[in-house]
Image (spheres, coloured by chain):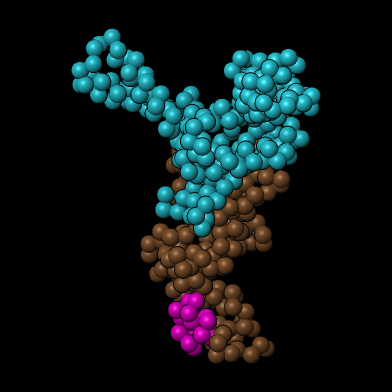
Chain colours: A brown, B cyan
Amino acid sequence: MAEISAQMVKDLRIATNAGVLDCKKALSETDGDFEKAVEVLRKKGLAGAAKKASRDANEGIVGTYIHGGARVAGMLVLNCETDFVARTEQFQQLARDLAMHVVAARPLYLSRESVPPELVAREQGIYREQTVASGKPAQVIEKIVEGKLDKWYSEVCLLEQPFVKDGDTKIQDMLTTAVAKLGENIKVGRFERLEVGG
Amino acid sequence: MAEISAQMVKDLRIATNAGVLDCKKALSETDGDFEKAVEVLRKKGLAGAAKKASRDANEGIVGTYIHGGARVAGMLVLNCETDFVARTEQFQQLARDLAMHVVAARPLYLSRESVPPELVAREQGIYREQTVASGKPAQVIEKIVEGKLDKWYSEVCLLEQPFVKDGDTKIQDMLTTAVAKLGENIKVGRFERLEVGG
């Protein structure tokens, strides 16, 4: 069992705005792992990320990533609230990681809200036909269609894609963790991906 | 008067596909300035650029440029015909220069052909009204409108903008010179510009 120092608790408090006891408990539960402790507090709704997500975020940087002898490149605007946070190595690393993710995962839209409605309707129609054709009972069809649509969103929407580096963490969750850690609202603005012959 | 060496003539021949005598003459006229000699041959229609412009260009690189503490970045696909040319320093410098230009000059469209027709019609309408209102004789109005439209194209179309570094050379002319020098068709594919708060 790792020793939980006062400094660790203090850092976690600054990062999450959670109380001393909650921070101590989260660090104990996660054997002193800072990132996991943030996650624990977030799941319990104790970290301040949710509240911060409503605040204006007009500062930030453009993250860029160039790959494969410059045959493909990605860039995205990563916003935060202050120039101070924009200059931190943590924020800049996140911007690089996300630009790299855009290059590798080829998202088409930012979030499910930004997918054109006619495209959603088309996908729904296809899934419904497939599901009806497979002979599933009528009462579960809409549920199955919804599940297929969720899977499709996680393939085409940046915020719902799993991060390519670990294949697991949702991009939205990476942002929420960063919000808790850096203490400011953080969000992705526009993103673009260019490829030679692409 | 600069000495015109056999090597210089040979280089210019390779770059432009023009004849020995034409290359010698162009170098004499321009006091041995390679770039100007290419230009002279191009104006005389002796360089091979025009013919090359019809060839396929599917190789290339993505040029990127990041400015002002990463608050703004630009990138563009610069195509050529072979990977060999794509790797040359000259081609890569051109890609960087063009990405930098995109950041600074904020083009909205690639060429006048890529401007939506309804936008062109709107601009024409405005210029026609202005010109009629200024009391110009009817027979010159269309000519004036055309001139104003050309000026507008040179503000919003990348290929018609003057290069920001010298404020003079049209981007399209930079490309044509590069075609003559590098001996392959070279063209701009997509370009994008991202800015924090932009």
Instruction: Measuring from the top left, give residue A144's x and y in whole percent.
Output: 55, 50
Left of B161 or right of it: where is A98?
right
Residue segment shown in magenta:
A9-23
Instruction: Measuring from the top left, give residue A21's x and y in whole percent.
Output: 49, 88
Name the residue located 37 percent from the left edge and 21 percent from the top edge. B147
| Residue, far top | B139
Q: Residue A82 sits in which quadrant?
A: bottom left
**Is residue A178 positioned above or below A165 on the image?**
below
Q: Is residue A146 visible?
A: no
Front position in the image: B93 or A69: B93
**Is residue B158 positioned above or below A96 on the image?**
above
Q: Main structural element of the magenta stretch: helix, strand or loop?
A: helix
**Is residue A135 positioned above or below A2 on the image?**
above
Residue B81 is inside the magenta segment:
no
Instruction: Measuring from the top left, give residue B160's x and y in whole percent.
Output: 49, 28
Name the residue located 59 percent from the left edge and 63 percent from the top edge. A93
Left of A61 or right of it: where is B10?
right
